[in-house]
Structure formats: C-alpha cells, structure tokens
Image (spheres, helix red, strand yellow):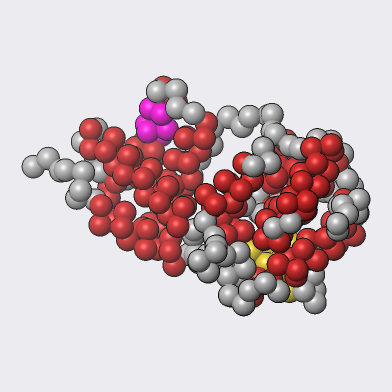
Amino acid sequence: MKKNSNEAIPLIQDFCHWLKEQRKSPNTITTYKRELVKFQEWLLGKKSAIDHLTKDDIKGYISFLEQQQKSLATIDKTAGAIRTFAKFLEKPDLIFGIKLEPVIKEDIETLSAEQYELLLTQVKEDGNLRDIAIVYLLLHTGIRVSELCSLNRSNIDFVKNELTIEKGEDKRNIPLSSDAKTHLENFLMSHTSDSIFISKFDERITERTVQYMLKKYNVNPNKLRHTFCQRLVDANVELEIVSRLAGIKDLNLTKRYLKNSNTNRIEEMINKTFINDTLG
C-alpha cells in the first residue's frame, strides 16, 4: 500500500519536540519542520520515506534542489534541517562524507565605518533604550537575532562583563564591551522581567520585531553580525577566536573575513575594536 505524506509526520513531530528540549528557537523549529515535510513529500515521490532514510536519499534531494536552482539560502536551510535530523536519529553515518553545504558566497555585507557611526548616532538620537541596547549587543557581540531574543538575565554577568549563549550542549561566552554593558544596564533598569528584551505587552520580543526595528535604519541582523566579525578580523583577532565568539563551527565561513590574524587577549580586543563608540 502506498504511503501518504502524513505517515511519517509523528516522527517529525518527535523531532520538533526534541528540538525544543535542545532549546532551539521557535523560528528554527518551524523552519526545520517545514523543510523536513518538503523532504518527506519528495521522498514519497521516490517511493521512500523519511522514517527509512538513507544516505542516497539525502544526496538525491540536495542534488534535486540544486537542479531546481533553489537559492543558496534555501539549500542551506534544508541542509541544516537534515544534519540536525540525523543527529536526532543518532545516525551520523547518514551524512558522513556528504557535502551538504552549498557553495559559500564570498561577498558579505558589512557596515562601512561611516555607516557604523551613523547607525549608532541615529539609534541614540531616537532615544529608545531597548533599541539602543539591541543595536549595541548585535554589533558588539555578533550574536544571532534568535539568540538575542532568547536572552534572559541569567545569561548576563555584569561582574565578569560577559554574555553567555547556550544551545543544548553548546555554550559560548562573549565579553561585553564597555558600551554594550552600559546600554544594557540602562535598559534593564526599565523593567523587572527575566526575559531581557520584551515587548510593550511584557512578552519576549520576536525576531520579526527586531528585524522591523532595524529596517528603520536600513540594516538587518545579519549585516550587524557580519560587521562584528569583520571588525574583529580587521583588528587582527585570530580566526579561531572570531569563530568561537560568533558561534561559527565551520572555520571556512570565518575565512571570508580574513585579512590578517594575530594573537591578542579577547577582552582587550573587544574593547579596542569598539573604543571609538561614544556613550552619548
């Protein structure tokens, strides 16, 4: 009897529950679920199914997406979902030896020095403490917008001047620049919620809200993240350190920012990189 596309959905639902336990963001869970459902539909057309996944299935689907001339972003999302799904199944052999990543685009969008200063000037002139803190954190820590939205007070240590990002078993500590610390402290005095960034309804802020706010300044979260990495590389911080701070597991991705490298103390380089930012 031919399977229908709903038969493997319980497995995908179990995967989504596992993702939640791994503290993945709601946006990531939604994206991975959508990509796996699409994968399942394709598999059914090949008389296979996601609950009997093989390495050839994965190779075939990635090849199919490339032949369909899907965007690099789409293929990357699919690859991320499949890679994580294999981890959930505890079957790393499914992706061993398979190149899931699409060809990396060499060009990355960053803020020029003038754009950087203009952004900070404009957001401070507008005077919204939350928005100021958001812009400084994204620029001075390089965290992803999903990570920013998930921040709790427990993730910040003002004694050590450190921000901690935790994803499942992965954990990374990022030094806070003096400016980022100051603006974050200023904002946190305005509310008592455990969630750092909240809406006017006292609910955790969404990624869409951050993106919409930044759109006013003609920037997006990725551009600020790229700017963080590029400025550190320009300041001769080693690629391995930049990768660790930004949570980039593939060093080849960090090499896009490469100009020079040198060994420096992380805390000193964070503050040195952003020393010219005024508190306003």
The quadrant in which residue 18 appears is bottom left
* Residue at 49%, 60% in the rendered image: 24
The quadrant in which residue 152 appears is bottom right
Residue 39: % across, % down: 33, 40
Residue 244 seen in this snapshot: no
Residue 2: % across, % down: 12, 40
Residue 60 lies in the magenta-colored region: yes
The foreground one among 259 and 108 is: 108
Query: Looking at the figure, which quarter contains the N terminus?
Result: top left
Residue 7 lies in the magenta-colored region: no
Residue 126: % across, % down: 73, 51
In the image, taking residue 194 as reference, residue 1 lies left or right, namely: left
Residue 115: % across, % down: 79, 37
Q: From the viewer's perspective, is residue 184 above or below residue 103?
A: below
* Residue at 86%, 58% in the rendered image: 279
* Residue at 44%, 22% in the rendered image: 69
Q: Report the magenta residues as a range.
A: 59-65
